[in-house]
Image (cartoon, grey):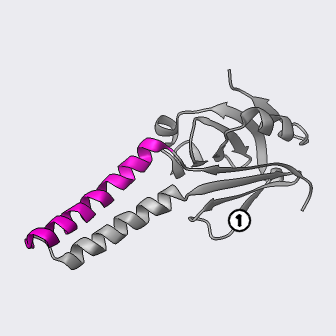
């Protein structure tokens, strides 16, 4: 592996998404406690516990999601934990152009997380700034970044076109 040019780790900490994920979990656990205290049994306790554990698990999973992106001289290595068990890589020889861009997560990719869509693949954790890789085979891949200028400055060391398209 060649020299590391830039490394970034981002945590998915969008406050309103955290609330959206937390609300169903709190609701289910509240219903369970109410049902136990009042002696009613509209739904079995086992079902409520199972749903509660599932919603709480999904909430914790989302709260702990993180994107690690390492830009090397010969490739980009990334991992979107916990969805990627192993690091993945894209060789710069497969890339036609690199652009540091502003994008709309909802409009362009349908939201945050790992996205596969018409515009290409996206690994976005938060914000609306990213590194767009235009691939030689036609598809594009976008990685969100919180430090667009720093990534751009680091990637200028590559022997390929890198543009900064943020106003």
Q: Secondary structure at mark 1?
A: loop
Which residue is outermost to the bottom? Answer: 46
Is residue 77 found inside the magenta-colored segment of the image?
no
**Residue 134 lies in what quarter of the image?**
top right
Question: Could you say where residue 75 lies in the image, as x and y percent from the top left?
Answer: 82, 54
Q: Is residue 34 magenta?
A: yes
Residue 37: tell me if it is visible: yes
**Residue at the location (43% across, 49% down)?**
18
Q: Is residue 74 above or below residue 57?
A: above
Q: Locate the N terminus and report the quarter of the image it occupies.
A: bottom right
Instruction: Say whether residue 111 is left or right of residue 163.
Output: left
Horizontal arrangement in the rendering, residue 3 relative to residue 15 (left or right): right
Q: Residue at x 91, y 40 (%)?
A: 157
List the residue tagged with mark 1: 87
Q: Is residue 37 left or right of residue 138?
A: left
Which residue appears farthest toward the top when viewing the image? 167
Q: Residue at x 64, y 54 (%)?
A: 67
Q: Quadrant of residue 103?
A: top right
Q: Nearer the viewer, residue 159 or 66?
A: 66
For the question of whether residue 115 can be seen, the reply is no
Q: Camera-side residue: 152 or 63?
A: 63
Q: How many badges with numbers are in the image? A: 1
Q: Nearer the viewer, residue 19 or 147?
A: 19
The magenta stretch is 14-41
**Looking at the image, residue 139 lies above or below residue 91:** above
Q: Residue at x 87, y 36 (%)?
A: 156
The x and y percentages for residue 115 are 53, 51
Q: Mostly what secondary structure, the magenta segment?
A: helix
- Residue 64, image x, y percentages: 54, 59
């Amino acid at each position: 592996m060649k020299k590391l040019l830039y490394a970034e780790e981002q945590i998915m900490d969008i406050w309103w998404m955290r609330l959206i994920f937390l609300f169903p979990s709190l609701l289910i656990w509240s219903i369970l406690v109410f049902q136990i205290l009042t002696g009613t049994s509209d739904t079995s306790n086992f079902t409520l516990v199972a749903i509660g554990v599932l919603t709480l698990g999904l909430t914790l999973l989302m709260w702990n999601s993180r994107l690690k992106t390492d830009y090397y001289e010969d490739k980009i290595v990334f991992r979107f934990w916990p969805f990627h068990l192993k690091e993945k890589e894209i060789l710069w020889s497969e890339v036609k152009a690199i652009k540091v861009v502003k994008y709309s997560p909802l409009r362009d990719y349908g939201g945050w997380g790992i996205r596969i869509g018409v515009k290409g693949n996206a690994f976005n954790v938060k914000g609306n700034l990213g590194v767009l890789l235009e691939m030689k085979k036609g598809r594009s891949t976008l990685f969100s970044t919180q430090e667009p200028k720093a990534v751009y400055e680091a990637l200028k060391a590559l022997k390929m076109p890198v543009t900064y398209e943020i106003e």
